[in-house]
Amino acid sequence: MNPHPIGVFDSGLGGLSVVRHLRQLLPNEDLVYFGDTARIPYGTKSRPTVVQFALETAGFLLRFDPKLIVAACNTASALTLDVLARELPVPVIGVVEPGARAAVRLAAGQPVAVIGTEATIASGAYVKAIRALAPAQPVIAQACPLFVPLVEEGRDGDDEIVRLTVETYLGPLRSQGVRVIVLGCTHYPLLRGAIAACLGPEVQIVDSGRETSLAVQRHLSQHDGLSPQQSPGTMQSYVSDNPARFRQVGSRFLNETIEHVELVEPEQYVGRPRVPH
Ligand code: DGL
């Protein structure tokens, strides 16, 4: 048993779509979340910048003495998990490997599509993780850069602009025999209905946030790391900008009201040395 909190970080509020599953699966765990709202998006930035930001953002969580850190951001997971695992003194679980594993299981050799930010797709991390599990697995990777701003603006699947954008990016997948699609970005679960409507019922959807939460549950069970407390776990949130917006928009991702959000000043999280790569 381990009473320490689980730390979760993201480039902004999107990681709350992962926290939502963590709260459901592990209701007695205390969570500390840091969203780097001052520097979102990570998905259009280069690897050295994302490495620096991820080290600083995850590094901030260390002051809460977490038993584990979840890199809820797909872009940070795809570009920096190796560095985080090397540099941080606690285990780090990213979203790419759990999503890839579920996709391979469901696809049974049929084509898989992976969608994400420009940086996630350019990194090739999902394709690499899928092929490490199933070398002959057909994979199509597609960046969908307009999805994040659409979701941040509060548009959902009933919106005509969303429907057209989803059709533009994903319509061509229909003729390619795709049977599984991985939502490789924190924001995409909010467009799940529009994505399902575009691809049809024969395409199964993998939410990498949910798969990651299952991986966290497995890890804690296997390492005697579950919280001993019987009461509901707490949730503390920290952001690097605009707590009011985080509270308002974030509750759509979390599906519950966000009570406690604190602004973190830059000197509390920046300044970790840049790691050579
Ligand atoms: N959290 C990011 C991800 O999952 C999306 C937003 C961003 O570009 O920072 O890739």
Image (spheres, rainbow, N blue to C red):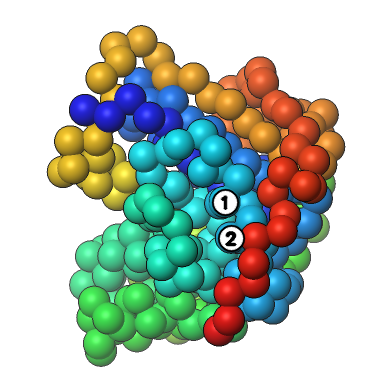
Looking at the picture, tell me which residue is in the foreground, 131 or 79. Answer: 79
In the figure, is residue 130 to the left or right of 269?
left
Tell me where residue 105 appears, x and y as whole percent: 23, 65
Say the numbered circle drawn on residue 258.
none
- Dot 1 falls on a residue whose secondary structure is helix
Q: In this view, does 128 lie above or below 158?
A: below
Question: Which amino acid, by three-letter code, is at mark 1?
Answer: Gly
Question: Which amino acid, by three-letter code, is at mark 2?
Answer: Leu
> Within 8 Å of ligand 1, the CB of disc 2?
no
Say the numbered circle drawn on residue 59.
1
In the figure, is residue 184 to the left or right of 50?
left
Looking at the picture, tell me which residue is in the foreground, 14 or 235. Answer: 235
Tell me where residue 144 appears, x and y as whole percent: 66, 70
Q: In which quarter of the image is residue 217?
A: top left
Say which residue appears at 63% left-offset and 31% top-offset: 237
Tell me where residue 254 appears, x and y as whole percent: 58, 32
Q: Is residue 213 visible to us here?
A: no
Q: Is residue 94 visible to us here?
A: yes
Q: Is residue 177 above or below residue 57?
A: below
The reply to whether callout 2 and callout 1 are in contact (CB within 8 Å) is: yes
Say the numbered circle drawn on residue 55.
2
Cα distance, mark 2 to mark 1? Answer: 6 Å
Looking at the picture, tell me which residue is in the foreground, 114 or 10. Answer: 10
- Dot 2 falls on a residue whose secondary structure is helix
